[in-house]
Image (cartoon, grey):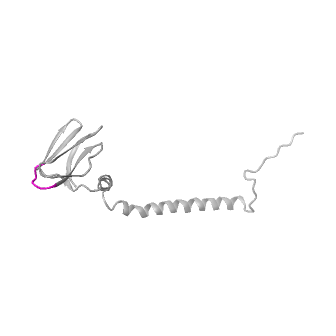
Amino acid sequence: MTSSTRMPRDTTDTGWGRTARGRVRAAAVGLTAAALLGGGLALVPAASAAPPDRDRAAAVSGAAPQGTAPACVKRSVSGRSATATNDCGRVMRVKIVVKHGPDSRCTSLKHRAWARHSWPFGSYDKTVTC
């Protein structure tokens, strides 16, 4: 004669029935999901307040780019190196932007001064004021 005993799935006796434990779990999952979604929705307006590229550029260089540099800032590009020369007659703050690569820092250039930036990957995009 053989006897088999089947052990219950949950061996701890909480005093709650199977249905009550299921409802508590469902409520906990629902509350967690609501908290996560509610917290995510609260962040959306703050995240969309400023364009992400401007935030990233400001964090990297300490100054946000203002726009493409004027024509009096001469550009020269050779391979993975670019030079910006200031012919504006006043101090200009410029930054060389590399597409899919590291940008230069924001640099103050006196009249007739120049700045060179080289990068390991990517391609020249533009020179901006900052």
For residue 43, side relative to residue 36 (left or right): left
Position above or below: 79 against 106: above
The answer to which of 24 and 51 lies nearer the viewer is: 51
Count of labels in the image: 0
* Image coords of residue 116 (percent x, y): 21, 43
* Image coords of residue 113 (percent x, y): 15, 48
Which residues are the magenta region? 86-91
Which residue is depicted at the point 87% across and 40% down? 2
For residue 119, side relative to residue 7 (left or right): left
* Image coords of residue 50 (percent x, y): 31, 60
Rendering quarter of residue 4: top right
Rendering quarter of residue 123: top left
Which quadrant does the C terminus fall into?
Answer: bottom left
Which quadrant does the N terminus fall into?
Answer: top right
Q: Main secondary structure of the magenta part?
A: loop
The answer to which of 67 and 7 lies nearer the viewer is: 67
